[in-house]
Amino acid sequence: MRKKNKPLCLQCGDKCKRTTTKFCSRECMKKHRKEHKVRYGGPELKREVLHCEWCDNPFYPYHKGMRFCSKECSGKFRWESGDRQWNVNGIESARNMKPEQKAKLAAAMSRRNKERGYTRGIGGKREDLGHYVRSRWEANICRLLKYTGIYYQFEPDTFKLSDGTNMYCYTPDIKIARRIYIEVKGWETPKARTKRLLMEEQYPEIEIIYINEPQYKYISKLVKDIIPNWEYDKKHGR
C-alpha cells in the first residue's frame, strides 16, 4: 500500500506530523486563522465593519443584529431612549422572559451565589404568593404583608440614577403605597450602597424602608410560627 505524503504546514511551511491535517501544530493553526479571519471548523469569516449607533466608532460585529460597539454605549443609548426591554446584543432581558426561563436563570444564579458564599437566597415563583421573588427573605416579607392585609406590588417601578459619570437603574423590592417601598437587604455591596445614597439624594420624595439582617431575624422570630408557608432556614437560624 502506497503511503501518503505528509503535507506542508500552511503557516510556517514545515512538514506536518499527519497526512490528514493542514498545520504542523496548534499554534500555527491559531496564527493562520487569526491572520486570515477563518472560523474554527468553518469557512472564512467575512465581517462587515459597522458604526456604533451611539459613539459612531467603527467595530466588527460578532453576530447579526449588533448595533453598538460596547455595553457602555448600549447602556447609554437605552438610558437616553428609555428602552430597557433589550440588552446590548438584542438578547431579551429577564423582565421579559417566560416563567420557566426566569426560573432556570434564578436557579443558576442562586447556585453561583452559594458557591461564592455571599447569599442564601433562593429565587423562583411562590405558589402561595402568585409571583416571582428573588430570595426566601423577600418571599417571607411578602407573606407577612399578605397576612396582615396590606396590598403590595413586587418590583413595579424602576428609578434612573446618575452620579455624573455612571448611570444606574434601581428597582426597589416591594411597593406598599404611592411613594413608599420596602427593600430587603441581607447585605450591602458597594454598588448597592451607591444606589441607596443616590436614591436619597435624587428622589427625596420617595420613602424606602430597609429591612436588614437583624430586623429580619427579629421579625422572623415573632411570626414564623404564625404565618403559613414561612420559609425558615434552620441551618443558619433564619
Image (cartoon, grey):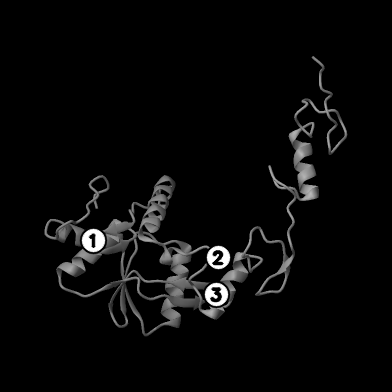
Q: Is residue 5 above or below residue 110?
A: above
- Please give left or right for residue 193 compared with residue 229 in the image: right
Q: Earlier in the sequence, mark 2 or mark 1?
A: 2
- Rendered image: mark on residue 90: 2
Give amino acid for label 1. Answer: Asn
Q: Inspect the image, locate mark 2, and give the three-letter code of the amino acid beneath it.
A: Gly
Q: Which residue ends up furthest to the right in the rendered image?
A: 13
**Residue labelled with disc 1:** 140
Query: What kind of residue is marked 3?
Result: Arg
The N terminus sits in image quarter: top right
- List x then y, in percent, for residue 81: 54, 80
The answer to which of 66 and 195 lies nearer the viewer is 66
Q: Secondary structure at mark 3?
A: helix
**Residue at image coords 34%, 51%:** 120
For disc 3, the marked residue is 78
- Residue 207's x, y, as percent? 33, 79
Name the element at disc 2.
loop
The picture quadrant where one finds residue 211 is bottom left
Mark 1 secondary-structure assignment: helix
**Nearer the viewer's eye, disc 1 or disc 3?**
3
**Residue found 58% across the figure and 74% down from its top:** 76
Q: Which label number is shown at residue 173? A: none
Could you give the CA–CA distance between mark 1 and mark 3, rounded to whole angstroms? 34 Å
